[in-house]
Amino acid sequence: MTASSPLQTPSVRELTVRGLILGALITVVFTASNVYLGLRIGLTFASSIPAAVISMAVLRALGRSSLLENNMVQSQASAAGTLSCVFATFPGLVMTGFWHSFPFWQTAGISLAGGIAGVLFTIPLRRALVTESALPYPEGVAAAEILRAGGEHGTSKSLSALVGGSLVAALFSFASSGLQLLADTVSVTGAAGAAVFRFSGGLSLALLGAGYLVGLSGGLAMLVGCVLAWGVGVPWLTALMPNPEHLDAGAFATAIWLHKVRFIGAGAIAISSLWTLVELMGPVLRGLNSAFRAHRGTLPPDHERDLSPRAMIALLGVTVVLLGGLFAAFLAPMAHGIWPAVCAAVLFCLVFGFVMAAACGYMAGIVGSSSSPISGIIIIAAVLCALMILGLETLGLMPAEMMADGQTLATAFTILLLSAITATVAIANDNLQDLKTGQLVGASPWKQEIALIAGCVVGAAVIPPVLNLLYQAYGFAGSPMPRPGMDPTHALAAPQPALISLIAKGIFTQSLDWTMLSFGLGLGAALIGVDLLLRRRQLALPPLGVAIGIYLPASVSVTLAVGAVLGWALNRKLRSRNSTTGGFGDPDRLPEAVTEHDASTGTMLASGFIVGESLTGVALAVLSGALGRDDSLSLAPWLPAGASPILGLIAFSAACVWFARKVLKS
């Protein structure tokens, strides 16, 4: 079987009503999970493989199913899971005080319009970057192999692993966040003179699973960043800076990290993201130029038919009207003379969105969707958007209200525009992987594109209520709590929205801590140099991973590193035991090197950990919002003092042992 030979016949099920319904149900689960995980640790998990496994099991139980029908389900669910990346921008509107909740129609409409634009932008790129391209698309190829393997050998083992991991994580999370019998972190604080040292680890199975999927290189890079932040930056600054509020050592160290060291991480993230884009820009431009020049003017065969030009034009028109209407509705209550700003914003979304869709598609083809530096693109978009608004103001085309009251409206409008851009580039980044999977299994592109749009519709409808639930239940770090009496230590970290808000607001108000940010830029440049030197010795220290490790709480970085090391050790053990096992690439990069064995064991268990904890978090958020308190089920008052960290560490260790045994026994 070759990539160019279509598998379908007129009698084969492909785009079906039951498949769309199943895809919608899976979409709800994985979108909610990814929004929760993204707001907590700044990372999401790829939903294609778990969605494919669930689809194969459910459709088989319902009767005759086909590989192509399963592919449509995973394409739909994958698109919606990717659309959840708007968690990186929308909460910024709450953090800046502009919104106090997430209005359904504005949040869903911007997500949907951006998502549809991402699908449309990938259609003219499909032949150039997928059908006639030599790009490897590691995740797309892996998904195709899993679909084939599932169709031939069954999926009960993989589904069992996914469900088992979900149940274990759900019970652990309920005991921790619900009953509060288990601590969610363990911390150690020490001092050497005036310098304070503080290290902590999160007792979270979702973090463990995410670290397993991130891989050794990324996990260790984040650990290095954590050591730089808490082993160098915090002790140095606590020794130099006064403590006028007379905080205890642990609280003082945390405050220094939050208000000083984290800005160093933000600067390092910015320069590292831009460098990653610069490194890939040459291949992007050369590949696109070669592909378009070689295939300009050719028509695809019937079995590779895309959506018709009429349908594409209609959808593009709907997208333009939807974006323009939502931007106008956002500005109209607070400003006059808004149409130049609205038109410029829509044009920015279309032009910048298409260019970045092409870049993201090419990068995804090279390194995979999981490693494509979308964060760098959002940072670039934030800077360009702010410059566009400032330019329009210089020309007298911007409403006067935009720059009033500390540029609050300008900052908020920038974040709203970035939300549309985020949806566009995230969908484009993922969809070309799905289209590659479809090419390999013989799917009809136009049907797959319909499934992708359906995924965007469902995902856009799910995102606003999930954001509202999570905000009302936990709040966001660094912003006012939604209700009095809430514990700010349980607030969701929301690292990306905080960074984007910081950049957008800082450009307009000049309120950024440029000292720490400038130091972070220099540190990022140094990390790039170190990585280049290590590459000469066939080693790597991804500078973006180190920068994220500085920016994220230590409890996140340490646990991710534990999961990464555990995954590396288990994968090495399996490889030594089965030296003939085939793979798709570097075994340490599990999201891009999923073997048939991994799909039924480690990868599915890790995905189950993430899904189980995420859904438990969402369920507890519903309960907390309904009762108006986040400790309604707490049994902590009946525990001896200091018991919950010990119990949490024991339970977490037991879950790690269980995970390892399940993987090695498979």
Image: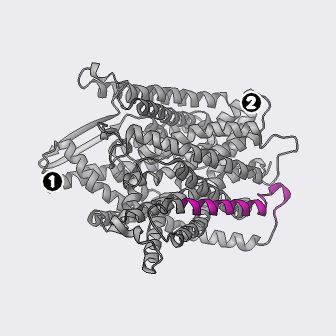
Query: Quick one: label 1, few (<14), some, or many (20+) residues within 10 Å?
Result: some
Q: Residue furthest bottom?
A: 395
Q: CA distance from mark 2 to mark 1?
A: 63 Å
Where residue 10 sits, quadrant-wise, is: top right
Residue at x 80% of width, y 57% of height: 305
Question: Label 2 sits on what residue type?
Answer: Arg
Magenta run includes residue 17? no
Query: Quick one: label 2, few (<14), some, or many (20+) residues within 10 Å?
Result: some
Magenta run includes residue 326? yes
- The residue pinned by badge 2 equals 60
Residue 550 percent coordinates (x, y): 34, 53
The reply to whether residue 565 is in sight is no
Residue at x 15% of width, y 56% of height: 241
Numbered disc in front, either 2 or 1: 2
Residue at x 25% of width, y 46% of height: 254
For the residue labelled by badge 1, is the local secondary structure a helix, a strand or a loop?
helix
Question: Label 1 sits on what residue type?
Answer: Ala
Residue 614 percent coordinates (x, y): 48, 36
Question: Mostly what secondary structure, the magenta segment?
Answer: helix
Number of numbered callouts drawn: 2
Where residue 175 sits, quadrant-wise, is: top left
- The residue pinned by badge 1 equals 239
The circle on residue 81 is: none
Residues in magenta?
Answer: 299-327
